[in-house]
Image (cartoon, helix red, strand yellow):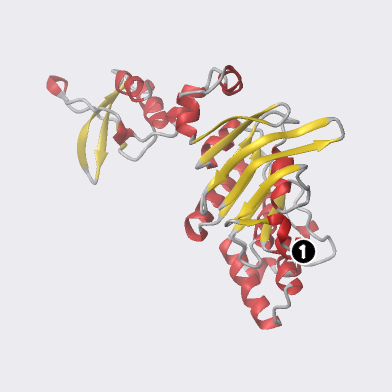
Amino acid sequence: MITFDRVSKRFGEVVAVRDLSLEIASGEIVVLLGPSGCGKTTTLRMVNRLVEPSSGTIRIDGRDTREMDVNLLRRSIGYVIQQVGLFPHRTVAENVATVPRLLGWDRARTHRRVEGLLDLVGLPPGQYAHRLPSELSGGEGQRVGVARALGADPDILLMDEPFGAIDPLVRGRLQDELLRLQQVLHKTIVFVTHDIDEAVRLGDRIALFSAGGALEQYAAPDLLLGAPASAFVDEFLGDGRMVRRLGLRRVRSARLRDPDGQGVPATAIDADATLREALDAVLGTGDGRVAVRESGRILGIIDSESIREAVR
């Protein structure tokens, strides 16, 4: 668990983070979201003391980070940035092995770890271990960056807009990859982005900041979208917040209708599909009705009114 207790950071007369108190539970993805200059990256960098707080306390599993050796603290926390930051004259394998070598792991253990991590992030070591960063695509480079951050199996992973410079198609794949990895690894991940859709897709909870580093709301994506805590939150999320909410809920959560005398529609959708996918299917049919199926049987009918009721 990471705990911020009344943490502030000033740079001269500028307040970057203001009196921040929040808890990040072990094993969850928390996204720091907000406009440029709102203190997201400063908050992230205070966790591993790349930036020192001006006041307040940050604790990891109850221990004040100021009491920890700063080098050991940083080696115990994975860190991924937008520019990747791979060493250009070292191979992929040598980049991934950076922290294990700093920690004094022997060659055999390091080799096993590197190969396992490259497999984990979808880069077969036989094809990628000996490549240089210049021989990688942007998406491949970010995967290597994630593998390097996981080198010593840290409990905490800090990610500062890691997919921000990647084209949308590859970015979506990397987001899927991160969610897949999290299902396997159960890390505590603090993720910075200014992209609302990315925050909603990845976050177990979202911390939304306004200018001057003020925390406006800290909530699960569905609650953030459904019940903005302030006018700022409502305005920042914009007119599309209810459409985004459709992407969080499953068809099975809606009140389905009986076929009645109209019969079962030819178009069907799985009960685990999102309501956003269901809306697309409903809009694409002639009569605005779609069958909902699970394990080969029909559970009921969903239509636009069912979808509207589900997100009220």
Identify which residue, 88 or 238, lies in the foreground: 238
Identify which residue, 255 or 269, lies in the foreground: 255
The vertical placement of 71 against 308, above or below, is below
Q: Residue at x 66, y 33 (%)?
A: 194
Can residue 165 be seen here? The reply is: no
Q: Tell me where residue 28 appears, x and y as whole percent.
A: 51, 49
Q: Element at badge 1?
A: helix
- Amino acid type indicated by mark 1: Asn
Can residue 98 be seen here? The reply is: yes
Q: Tell me where residue 161 appears, x and y as whole percent.
A: 69, 42
The vertical placement of 253 against 62, above or below, is above
Apparent side of residue 261 relative to residue 211 in the rendered image (left or right): left
The vertical placement of 260 against 34, above or below, is above
The vertical placement of 132 against 2, above or below, is below
Residue 300 position by quadrant: top left
Q: Tell me where residue 45 appears, x and y as whole percent.
A: 73, 47
Q: Residue at x 55, y 56 (%)?
A: 187
Identify which residue, 303 or 161, lies in the foreground: 161
Task: Give the labeled residue for mark 1.
Answer: 71
Q: Residue at x 71, y 26 (%)?
A: 211
